[in-house]
Amino acid sequence: MSFIRITVLIQTLISLMVLSSSIAFGQNVPLKKDNVKVKGPMLAHIVLNVSDIKKSAKFYQDLLNMDVTEIAESDGKTRYFLSNTDSHHKLVLMENSDLPEYNQRIIQQIAFEVPDRKSLLAQYQKLKNQPQLELKNNQISWSIYIRDPDNNNIEIFWDVRDQPFGDKKWKGEVTELSEESLKTGIPE
């Protein structure tokens, strides 16, 4: 190996070590992944306790287009790994027959983003017969809310901050979103 190649290799390794140590210590190091700017470690997945793992897996497969990528046993608990990307998993379901009541759980909701209004409308067409479905205009997003088999709140949203009618900040404002607005793209 030539001196120049060794020097470039050492410089690359040092850069990677500095970058990884900056991330580990929470410094705001801008990173790029899939055209998304990230200022530190990126959320990769959520593990969710469920009372009926097969029923929950079917819900996420059928309604949110997630695939089971692996089923594993550990510590006497079954885990289903699911993803709707090329990553191994974004959601892990872990069977737990002893769930606390909904209002005593830690997770308030799980949100899934779609790229545009047409995608949100397609999701609505797929989900519109779900019990407890709600359409909301959060001013920064248009959202569909449903409940999974364990009553966890699931949000599917389109970020509208770059639309003429979208706000840059949430400000706590939530209004009803009509099916007509979702179809036409024109807020009421």
Image: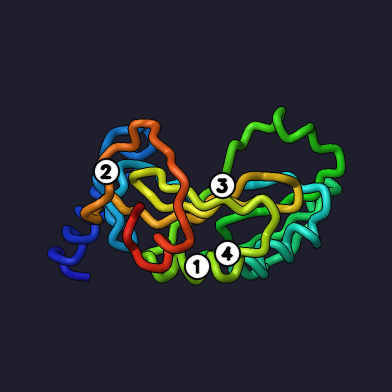
> Left of 90 or right of it: where is 157?
left
> Left of 187 or right of it: where is 12?
left
Element type at mark 3: strand
Q: Residue furthest top?
A: 104
Q: In the rendering, at what x and y percent does residue 153 appear?
A: 62, 45
* Residue at image coords 23%, 49%: 15
Given residues 129 and 105, the one toward you in this image is 129
Whether tag 1 and tag 3 are in contact, CB under 8 A, the answer is no
Whether tag 1 and tag 4 are in contact, CB under 8 A, the answer is yes
Q: Earlier in the sequence, mark 3 or mark 4?
A: 4
Q: In the rendering, at what x and y percent does residue 121 appear?
A: 46, 67
Q: Which residue is mark 3?
A: 110
Q: In the rendering, at what x and y percent does residue 132 appear?
A: 66, 50
Q: Which residue is mark 1?
A: 85
Element type at mark 4: strand
Q: CA distance from mark 3 to mark 2?
A: 22 Å
Rendered position, 75 above or below 173:
below
Circle 2 residues within 10 Å: few <14, some 14–19, many ≥20 = some
**Residue 167, visible in the rendered structure:** yes
Circle 1 residues within 10 Å: few <14, some 14–19, many ≥20 = few
Q: CA distance from mark 4 to mark 2?
A: 30 Å
The residue type indicated by label 4 comes to: Ser
Q: CA distance from mark 1 to mark 4?
A: 5 Å
Q: Which residue is mark 4?
A: 83
Q: Nearer the viewer, mark 4 or mark 2?
A: 2
Rendered position, 135 above or below 83:
above
Q: CA distance from mark 1 to mark 3?
A: 16 Å
Residue 167 is tagged as 2
